[in-house]
Image (tube, coloured by chain):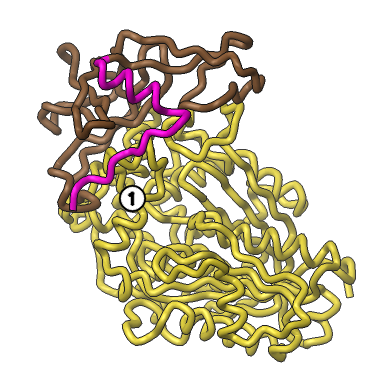
Amino acid sequence: MTGERLDPVIVGVGESDAIGAVPDRSSLALHAEAARAALADANLEPDQVDGVLTNESYHDYHVRHAMAFAEYFGIRSSASMIASLPLGSGASSGMFVHKAADAIRAGRCTTVLAVSADNFLSALRRGGAVQALAENRDKEFEAVYGPILPACFALVAQRHMYERGSTVEQLAAVAVTMRRHARRNRRAHMQAALTVEEVLADKTIATPFTRTMCSLVSDGGAAVVVTTRERAEALGRPYVEILGTAVAYGTGDDKFTENSLSNVRDLLDIGTARSAPAAMAQAGVTWSDVDVLMAYDCFAITPILYLEAAGFCQPGEGGLWFEDGRAALGGTLPVNPHGGMMSYCHPGNPGGLFMFTHVVAQLRGEAGAVQVPGCQVALVTGYGGQMAFWPCTVLGTGR
Amino acid sequence: MSRRLPVPNEDSGPFWNACAEGRLQFQWCESCGELNWFPRRMCRSCHSDELRWRTVPGTGTIYTFSVVHRPPGPEFASPYVLALIDVNGGPRMMSHVIAVDPDNVWIGAAVAVEFERLSEAVTLPVFRLDGER
């Protein structure tokens, strides 16, 4: 055994039986399917789980969401942590791993199940999802102006085009890259071929975004199990090391944290510029060590921002990486080999957790047709509350 | 369904009252000089009680914008121009740019405030282009 006995590691991952359009499953059922799959993957019995993390749901509201899940799934009363994180879609999966790792290191828990699921497509439908997400913004000084979520990220994209010269063709290339990856992944929600021309000709949602520059509205759930290295070794299953986790609140320039968009000084100065170097320093890795980037691709601008903010390229170059294939499978730094939330699956909050289920498969060498050869180090990003908080996680091959 | 309106509260009442009078006003701290937006009880920089409302001229520039073709519900006539406005001498605020050809809006454009009375309690600040490109 290398490293410390109580080091947190990911020992199991799982997804709901089906993802994409799953009209016959409740939100809690999707949670339970993903959780059961993750425990089976880890070779764990249900009574070995002593920590649970969930997210609140956009449509299946429970005052105590984590307790509702725990009752539904049969978490034992010997558990020492059952908690739900607030809706912070883009950041929630990174926060799961961050908080699970803390609980393991502190000795509060030995085995934490983090699970998130929703039937975003079948229960809310597309219109309901748009409406739910529009209410994300400040209820008094922003929501009244109809800031649908695509428009909020469109504000970022327009500024990026203005300041750093990215183009609509580059935004389209992000969508096309995700689709090409998804087409090699049979489980992905979207399988149809997609070209830059088709993305540009698609229906405009909020300029500069067309529909295919936005993430999907899907059903599905995902789960990860974090435990100690000692227990993972005993389970005899391959595990993945959590080498570094960091969260930045607020942008680099701002004196204060901001929950709104209005008060962010620089929409391009995302907190990843602080959380990525912090997580990489903790992990003892540098940019050239990273084999795969999992970029929270809620809209086509964000993977571009991550490449720039995390320091993989210069400001203004991110879009080029998608145009010339550096961000594609086989390129310098493959981004979202599973197809991302733009083509694999995006059921709202759980979207980011599929980045973890996939990247664990990558690091175990089990990603099949989308395997990045020799994948040893992965960086997973998150983008929460739009401009509010940014987790970064560095994962590495374990045993 | 009608548009869900802001509900003025103890902190924000003076802001909305000024809008009803056709004025845009914000809070500055007398103690440390910090501009505080959105409205609040105490200065978020030094926690002093000495926040004072000051009216600004209501001009500004477009920091960024998006033409929204897919509104959250039928209560919004689309397309509309969602924008973040740098208010001259004030904060950045989310708003609409109204009465404009959506193809003729640009970052850096000068704008001036106008007020849309939506209800007894809420008169909403919006902006109109103020000059040529």
Q: Does A357 sit left or right of B85 as displayed?
A: right
Query: Where is mark 1, residue-wise?
Result: A134
Q: In this view, does B45 lie above or below A365?
A: above
Report the residue at 61% width, 77% height from top.
A365
Q: Does B92 sit left or right of B70 as displayed?
A: right
Q: Is residue A349 above or below residue A357?
A: above
Residue A247, horizontal then vertical, whole percent: 65, 48
Report the residue at 10% width, 29% height from top.
B101
**Magenta run includes residue A319:** no
Q: Does A41 sit left or right of A306 as displayed?
A: right
Q: Is residue A302 above or below residue A184?
A: above
Using the image as rendered, state which of residue B85 and residue A192 is in the foreground: B85
Report the residue at 39% width, 81% height from top.
A186
Inspect this view and state whether residue A399 appears.
no
Inspect this view and state whether residue A227 appears.
yes
Report the residue at 51% width, 79% height from top.
A31
**Magenta run includes residue B11:** yes
Residue B26, horizontal then vertical, whole percent: 42, 17
Residue A394: quadrant of the picture: bottom right
Residue A153, horizontal then vertical, whole percent: 37, 44
Residue A233, horizontal then vertical, whole percent: 82, 82
Q: Chain B is drawn in which colour?
A: brown
Q: Principal SS element in the magenta part?
A: loop
Q: Give the range drawn in magenta.
A: B1-22
Using the image as rendered, state which of residue B104 and residue B111 is in the foreground: B111
Using the image as rendered, state which of residue B124 and residue A322 is in the foreground: B124
Q: The yellow chain is which one?
A: A
Query: What crowding class fits label 1: few (fewer than 14 Cα within 10 Å), some (14-19), or many (20 or more)?
Result: many
Task: Tell me the quadrant of the picture where the N terminus of chain A can be found.
Answer: bottom right
Task: Tell me the quadrant of the picture where the C terminus of chain A can be found.
Answer: bottom right
In the rendered structure, which amino acid carries the disc numbered 1? Ala
